[in-house]
Amino acid sequence: MAYVSSVAVMVSDRERSLEWYTGRLGLDVVETDPTDPHWVTVGRTGRQGALHLCQAGDYPDLVLEPGDSGIDLRVDSDFKKACATWKSRGIRFAIPPRKRSWGWEAHVTDPDGNVIRITSPLTQ
């Protein structure tokens, strides 16, 4: 059976994006390849799912550009507290945290304009 290993997030500067995803959003570096600097993934250690920080220009035949990704993240803990932590780290919300009929939702963008939709578990 197949499963999702990673989702490519097109970025213009891998180091800047790595700092943003780890230092501000609080994700972990999940996997790197010392023989290929192109391969860097972030996510949560011990959990499934990762984002591959795919720097534009690494492979000339790629047709995606920075900002072409749409990502959903789920917060298992206190949603409003997590959003407050991110705000204190300098993350700006494109759509601030808001209560929906099914739970909580907010939208942030990374340094390249990739939209990240953050949600709570259903009915939190």
Image (spheres, rainbow, N blue to C red):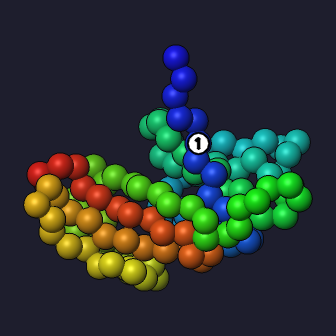
Q: Position of residue 52 (x, y in %)?
A: 64, 50
Q: In the rendered image, which quarter is residue 53 located in?
A: bottom right
Indicate whether 72 appears above or below 65. above
Q: Residue at x 54, y 23 (%)?
A: 2
| Quarter that holds the C terminus | bottom left
Q: In the rendered image, which quarter is residue 57 located in?
A: bottom right
In the picture, measured across the screen, residue 25 lies left or right of residue 57, that is: left
Q: Position of residue 85 (x, y in %)?
A: 35, 72
In the picture, measured across the screen, residue 48 lies left or right of residue 8, that is: left
Q: Position of residue 38 (x, y in %)?
A: 80, 52
Q: Is residue 73 visible?
A: yes
Q: Residue at x 71, y 56 (%)?
A: 54
Q: Among all residues in the image, which is located at the extreme top?
A: 1
Q: Position of residue 29 (x, y in %)?
A: 61, 50
Q: Residue at x 11, y 51 (%)?
A: 123
In the picture, measured across the screen, residue 79 lies left or right of residue 10, that is: left
How crowded pointer 1 is (Cα within 10 Å; few <14, some 14-19, many 20+) is rated as some
The amino acid sitting under disc 1 is Ser
What is the secondary structure assignment of the residue under circle 1?
loop
Indicate whether 78 appears above or below 13. above
Q: Is residue 24 visible?
A: no
Q: Residue at x 66, y 42 (%)?
A: 31
How many marks the image carries: the answer is 1
Q: Which residue is mark 1?
A: 6
